[in-house]
Amino acid sequence: MYYITKNCVGCHNCFSECPMQAIEWSGMRYEIDQDKCVRCGLCARVCHTASIIDTEAKDNVCYHDRIEKTADVVVAGAGTGLVAAVRAAQQGKKVIVIEKSSRLGGNTDYAHAFFPVYTKWHEKAGMVDAREKAIEHYMNATDGVLGEDVIRTAVYATGEFFDWLCTFGTAEDVYHLVNLGDADAHGPIYGPGLLDFPNRIVDNLNCRDDAIGPGWGGTYVKYTMLKAIEDENLDVEILTEHAASHLLLDDEGAIAGVVAKDPGGETVIHAPVVVLATGGFGKSDEKLKEFEPWFMAGETPIHRFSVPTDTGDGIDMLRELGVEPVPERLFISMFGPKHHPFSNTLADIALEPDMLQINLNGKRWINEEGHLFGMTPHIAEQPKEISYSIQSVDNIKSVAERFINNPAMASKKHLYETWLEELEDEAKLDIPVKKADTLAELGRLCGMPEGALEAEVARYNEFCAKGVDEDFGKDAKNLVPVSDHGPYYAIYGQRFSEAALGGLMVDGQCRVLRNDNTPIPGLYGVGDATSAMHRRGELAVISELTWGVASSFTSGNNAVDYVNQHGPAGQIVTRGYAAGEGGR
C-alpha cells in the first residue's frame, strides 16, 4: 500500500501523474484513495521529496562496518552542489557527492530561474555590461552588510556559470533573453536583459500549477549536470541516503574529510576539500524555535515547502567545530495570506485588489492593494492567522478575464481559463474554497460570527458607492462592490514559508569562515546553507538560485585550485571525530 507522509509539500506531482486519479486532497495534503489505487508505484517514483512510501516494502537495509573512501573533493548535497562536482571533475579531480535523501535535487528542484547580469548572450545582443553598476546597486540596497566580495562573486560568477552551461548544448532550447531596456533594477533583476526560463520542461509536465514543484530552472540545472557526468564519463560518484554528519580535520585544523550516516551504518570519506551544499533548515522545528520562536507559535501551522531533508546539517557540523551561526544573517521566510498548497490560479485571483480580505471575525483587516508582501506583516495578527478572499462569482470572473486577456500573461493564459472549474472542484473539499448562495451561509461555512460577513460587505459596498474606503484607503478604482446575488466564494489563505536560509558565513571565494572571520582551509559553502545573501527579516536582493549556481560554480573552481596547491587525497591524519566509532 502506498502512503503519502506528512512531509508532502503539495507540489501536485503525484496528483498530476496518477493514471487512476486515486490521489486527492485531505486537509492540507494529498491522500491516496486505496480503493482506486492499483499499486503501480508511479506516485512514489515521481515524488521528488520521497514523501510517498510503500508500507509493504521489505527492509532491504544491509548493515555494515564503517566504510572508508577517498576523494579529492566531497560535495555534501546534490542540488546546486552538482555544479561544483561537475566543475571539479572536468578538471581531473575525483569527486564524491553525498546526498541525504533518496532523491537528488533538494530545494533546487523548487527554484524557477537565475538572473545573470551579463553573459555572452547579452554581449551578442549589444546590451551594456552593467555588472559594476549591479554591484553598486546591491551594495546600496543592503547598506553594505553583505560585503562587496560576496556580491561581486554573485554578479560575475552567475554570468560565467551560464556561459559554461551553454557549452552543454541545450540552453538555447530552454532560455530566452528578453530586452528590458535600461540597465536598471527590475524587481529582483538588475541589468538590461532578463534571462527568462518561461516553461517547465522536465518533470511534473502534466501539472497545470506553476507555483511550486520540479521542472523549472533548478531542475534543468540538476539534469544538465547529471547528463554531463554520464556523457563525459566524469569521475563523480553519487551516494544517496548518505547524510553528512561530521567534518574531519587534520592536525593543523584543515579539512580532511567528512563522515556520512547511511542506512546501514557509516561512511568516512577522506578528502582535502569538502563543499557544503546541505541546504537550509526549513524542516527543522528545533532550529526554527531557536532562531525565530514566533514561527512555531501560531494556532495554524505555517505551510512549509522545504524538502524533508532541509534540517540545517551544515549548522550542526560547524557547531561541532565551535562555529556558531550569526542570527542576524539568517532568513526565515514567512508570507501570507496565500492559497497554498492549493491551486495557484486561485491564489493569484485571491490576491487581486477586487477581492475582500476577511478574517475569521468577519472583518476586513487590510487594504487589499497591498498584495502579498504588503499583507505579510499583518496576517499573523489575524485570528488563527487565516484570511478568506471573498467575492461573488461575477466579480471573480472579471478578475480571471483580466489575467486571460493580459498580453504579459499570454504564456500562462491556459492556467486561468479553467478558473471556474478549479473553484468548483475545490469547493467540494473541506478547506480550500467555500461556496454559498448567500453571504449569511458563506459566513457560517467559514466559521464567522452570525451576521458579521453580511454587515462587513454592506459597509464595504457603501464605500464603493462613495468612492472612498474609510477603513483602509483603497484606491477608488479598486473599490469593486460585491454583487447582490450569488453564488459567493471564499478562497482560503494562510501563512506559508518557502525556506529557512543561512548558517554558514562565507567570503567571496565561498570559503566557510569561523566566527573570527578566518577561513577553515578546504571548506566551501554553497547556496541556501550559507548566509551570503541573507539578513534577518529582509528578502535577499539576489535570488536563491542565482546565488546557488554562482557559489557552486565558484566553489568548484576554488576546490580544484586548493587541491592543486595542497596535494590530492591520501592517508590524512584526522581529528574532530573519534576514529573507530560508528558502523553497526
Image (tube, rainbow, N blue to C red):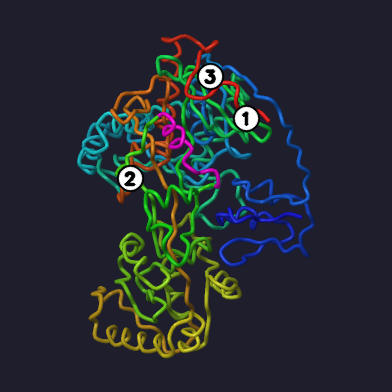
The magenta stretch spans which residues? 308-321
Q: Which mark is residue 239?
A: 1
Mark 1: secondary structure? strand
Viewer-proximal residue among 317 and 482: 317
Mark 2: secondary structure? loop
Other-residue count near label 1 (Cα within 10 Å), few / some / many at <14 / 14–19 / ≥20: many
Q: Are marks 1 and 2 in contact (CB under 8 Å)?
A: no
Q: Position of residue 84 (x, y in %)?
A: 48, 26
Q: Look at 57% across and 23% down and name the residue there.
A: 96
Mark 3: secondary structure? helix
Q: Position of residue 540 (x, y in %)?
A: 33, 45
Other-residue count near label 3 (Cα within 10 Å), few / some / many at <14 / 14–19 / ≥20: many
Amino acid type of the residue that numbered disc 2 sits on in the rendered structure: Ala
Residue 512 in the image: above or below residue 19: above
Q: Marks 2 and 3, how far apart in space?
A: 31 Å
Viewer-proximal residue among 302 and 249: 249
The residue that disc 3 covers is: 89
